[in-house]
Image (tube, rainbow, N blue to C red):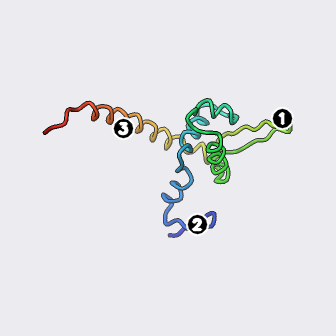
Amino acid sequence: MEIHYKEKTYFSGKDLALSAIGGRWKIAVIWCLLHDSPLRLSEIQKKLPQANQRMLIRQLRELEEDQIITRFVYPVVPPKVEYQLSDIGLRLEPVVTSICNWGDEFSDFVKKEATKIPVE
């Protein structure tokens, strides 16, 4: 079954899902918004200091385009913009939590493997 979305063809829902949430900072942004929402860009940057602003903005735009997050612009000067998860974005909670938990387990595994003495 082919899925056509944003001028691309996906061969399964899995491909489409990975395209929507795959990205260096997307899971981290979703994680932040699951635990504290709504957030402004500067607040997301504080939570993810390794990410540069340009990359975060790109990832936020892609998540918004896929309707995973919503962006609310307040009619004030200077502009105030907040991000939060949409209804479909909130449904990612068990997925993102599982990925993050697995990441912690994998990190422990990698640390243990690094301390093993190689067998000759």
Q: Mark 3 — residue?
A: 106
3D distance between C-alphas at marks 3 and 2: 33 Å
Q: Is residue 84 visible?
A: yes
Circle nearer the viewer, 3 or 1: 1
Disc 3 is placed on an element classified as helix
Mark 2 or mark 1, which has the lower sequence index?
2
**Quarter location, residue 54:** top right
Label 3 is placed on what type of residue?
Phe
Mark 2 vs mark 1: in front: 1
Residue 3 placement: quadrant: bottom right
As drawn, the residue found furthest toward the bottom would be 1
Q: Dot 1 corresponds to which residue?
A: 78
Marked residue nearer the N-terminal end (3 or 1): 1
User: Residue reaching furthest left?
Assistant: 120
Residue at the image position 43 percent from the left and 36 percent from the top: 101
| Amino acid under disc 2 | Lys
Q: Position of residue 65 (x, y in %)?
A: 67, 53
Left or right position of 65 against 18: right
Q: Is residue 85 left or right of residue 119?
A: right
**Residue 12 screen position, x and y as percent:** 49, 63
User: Of the residues under marks 3 and 2, which one precedes in the sequence?
Assistant: 2
Q: Which residue is mark 2?
A: 8
Q: Is residue 87 visible?
A: no
